[in-house]
Amino acid sequence: MAEGTVKRLTDKGYGFIDTGGGPGTDMFFHSSNVEGVSYDELTEGQRVSYTEGKGPKGPRAENVTPV
């Protein structure tokens, strides 16, 4: 599983993970892909692990779990 840092969370139920790969490499995730905690328990700057999946608009993080 890859690891990254929660960069931004929205009140619409999705967020972005900084993958550490440089500009433009943030990974989208939806609240339905969070495991182990609820979406509301995540905080910006928190380390998470995830698997890279394929969404309708491109790559997305799945199985997002706090580290």
Image (tube, helix red, strand yellow):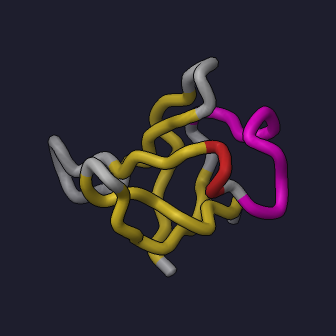
Q: Is residue 11 above or below residue 23?
A: above
Where are the magenta residues, as a range? 35-44
Q: Quadrant of residue 54?
A: bottom left
Q: Identify the residue at the far top of this view.
A: 11
Q: Quadrant of residue 9?
A: top right
Q: Is residue 62 above or below residue 5?
A: below
Identity of the residue drawn at 36% across and 51% down:
27
For the image shown, how many numbered marks are present on the structure? 0
Q: Is residue 40 above or below residue 10?
A: below
Identity of the residue drawn at 53% across and 68% down:
50
Task: Measuring from the top left, give residue 67's x and y in whole percent.
Answer: 69, 65
Task: Measuring from the top left, give residue 48's x and y in whole percent.
Answer: 60, 59
Q: Identify the residue at the far left of this view.
A: 23
Identity of the residue drawn at 31% across and 46% down:
26
Q: Main secondary structure of the magenta part?
A: loop
Q: Pick whichever, 54 or 43, lies toward us.
A: 54
Q: Identify the residue at the far front of this view.
A: 56
